Amino acid sequence: MKSIQIITAALAIWLIVSFGAQAATLRFALPEDEDLADSLQAASLLAETVTDPEARRLDIVAAAQADYRRLLAVMFENGYFGPVISIQIDGTEAAALPVVSGNGAVESVTVTVQPGPRFLFRRAEIAPVPPGTAIPEGFAAGRPAGTDILRETTAAGIGAWRARGHAKAELAAQEIVAIHPENRLDAVLTLAPGPRLRYGPVVVAGAERVRETRISRIADLREGRVFDPEEIDDAAQRLQRTGAFNSVAIVEAEAIGPGDTLPLTIQVAERLPRRFGVGAELSSIDGLSLSAFWLHRNLTGNADSFRVEGDIEGIGGGTGGEDYILSFAYNRPATFNAETDLYANAFIESLDQPNFTAERAGVEVGARRIVSDEFSYSYGVAYERSRVTDAFGERNFSILSLPLEAEYDRRDQDLDPTNGYYIEASVEPFNGFETAGAGLRFLGDFRGYQGFGGERRTVIAARLQLGTVVGPAIDEVPSTDLFFSGGGGTVRGQEFQSLGVTLPSGQIVGGKSFAGFSAELRQSVTDTIGVVGFYDVGMVSANSDWSDGETHSGAGIGLRYDTGIGPIRLDLGFPVSGPDDQTGFAIYIGIGQAF
């Protein structure tokens, strides 16, 4: 009478709900295994139906009758092939009730599951499989049996054949025998790999404004190449990454084509081509920043994008005057090859900073290679001309450079990461004309995130910023390419660009090297509210090797409100150390985490 003992010790959960004049009690008597009990409750329709105040008797009876199959499936998935399931409505087995059984109130519903013994594999075989195929560890003699592991093993075998070009691999036969006296299961799975296929004709469907030839070029599924499911996934991701499509699906033909080929259909649904957006960020020191952009996702019918963006920064702040920036960005996907895009950027800006003013314009043309979802790099040629007024006087700069940038992103999400890391680095050799020197500029941004707990409600985040200019004298570099510290992007609580290199005259200019470190402890209080404690430190040096620099630091607390697409950020920062007056505070408001 072991099963009776199990039920006696089983978990009992009572949910009492009221709907109108009717009160119904739902009781679950489930196995002691908490994970199994949770799975059974999650699969039950009754758990949702009984708590619905608008549910009628016929709804509850229908849900109960559907639950037999649903609960049985959960038991089979977990290796219990002899369970006893009883669902009683007011003392009568639900299976014996007609769905249309009157409109009377339901007083009680009892769901009882006696699991019986758990079956183990006596025999576990799958064949044929390619050499080196990784079969799930759970598919072996002596391990718990269940339909989940059978499906997982079948998928692994079929996936291994497909990865070798056998696109139509399938489960040809399965022999599943339960030996009840021994509580054992024999499972023999037979696969049919089918022929090794090559891509056949590729047809595009759903294209309206984007040229079909460009869609095929971006997908790059060339006829005659051996079928590769990973290559097909990459093709779909490249098309999605252009931003021109709401959805992309690459559909394999049902039947094999002539000569062991596989016809494909690229099914796309296009987005509206135009989009615009606005943004704002507020700081008690930096002032108000406003931004707006206009984007065309398919400028010439080649899934090429063109973006115009305008920014006004420093409105009403203590950071000099207002800064005005107008930028243009063009991107043409799959120009040099399927993974390499052409980009062309240009900008015009007027800067009124605390320690300098500048009028600048520049253009850059290059190639961006997207190696994977995580890693990309770009290279190009850029020209910039500027007129700068700072402690060294008014000077004109003309700079020709060869920028090389790389980005590696392993964060779980962009605006509110809880795990992973992010690395961005650039090296830019340059040659100057007029008053500009020649040399190399390096920038690095390294961020790491570690979450704790089941839902990662506690997160430690850290950021290291590095920058240096090697080669020219400090007065041969425009102030826009030198380094300052202080403000929302470096050290919160300190005044914007308050730390630089102090000349004998007492005036401040930017340094040739910079190092900044930030650490945050982020804690979720509710599903939408979070609090943050932070500490920032920055160092600026007149030398290229980060030596003999001055430092300052700031710390504070923050509040986060999760909007679903990213948190609204409110930070209160205080100066901690540095050469300036360490009194006062600063408030920063924006969208997304500080880093």
Image (tube, rainbow, N blue to C red):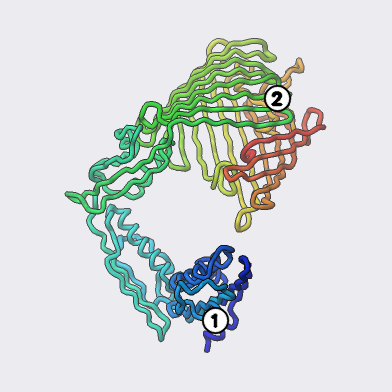
Residue named by callout 2:
500
Q: Label 1 to label 2, Cα distance in Å?
A: 81 Å
The residue lying at 26 percent from left, 53 percent from top is 254
Place of residue 407 in the rendered image (x, y in percent of width and height, measured from the top left): 50, 37
**What type is the residue that disc 2 sits on?**
Gly
Place of residue 414 in the rendered image (x, y in percent of width and height, measured from the top left): 55, 42
Instruction: List the single residue furthest toward the left.
Output: 258
Disc ID at residue 91: 1
| Quarter assignment of residue 190 | bottom left
The answer to whether 455 is drawn above or below residue 300 in the figure is below
- Give the mark, 1 or 2, whose residue is nearer the N terminus: 1
**Mark 1 secondary-structure assignment:** loop
**What type is the residue that disc 1 sits on?**
Gly
Asked if residue 347 shows in the view, the reply is yes
- Dot 2, crowdedness within 10 Å: few (<14), some or many (≥20)? many
Front-most of 72 and 576? 72
Front-most of 220 and 298? 298
The answer to whether 551 is drawn above or below residue 145 in the figure is above
Which quadrant of the rendered structure holds the C terminus?
A: top right
The residue lying at 42 percent from left, 41 percent from top is 246
201 with respect to 281 (left or right): left
The answer to whether 136 is drawn above or below residue 419 in the figure is below
The residue lying at 58 percent from left, 73 percent from top is 26
Place of residue 51 in the rendered image (x, y in percent of width and height, measured from the top left): 58, 65
Asked if residue 242 shows in the view, the reply is no
Front-most of 108 and 256? 108
Place of residue 43 in the rendered image (x, y in percent of width and height, measured from the top left): 50, 67
| Discs 1/2, front | 1
296 with respect to 424 (left or right): left
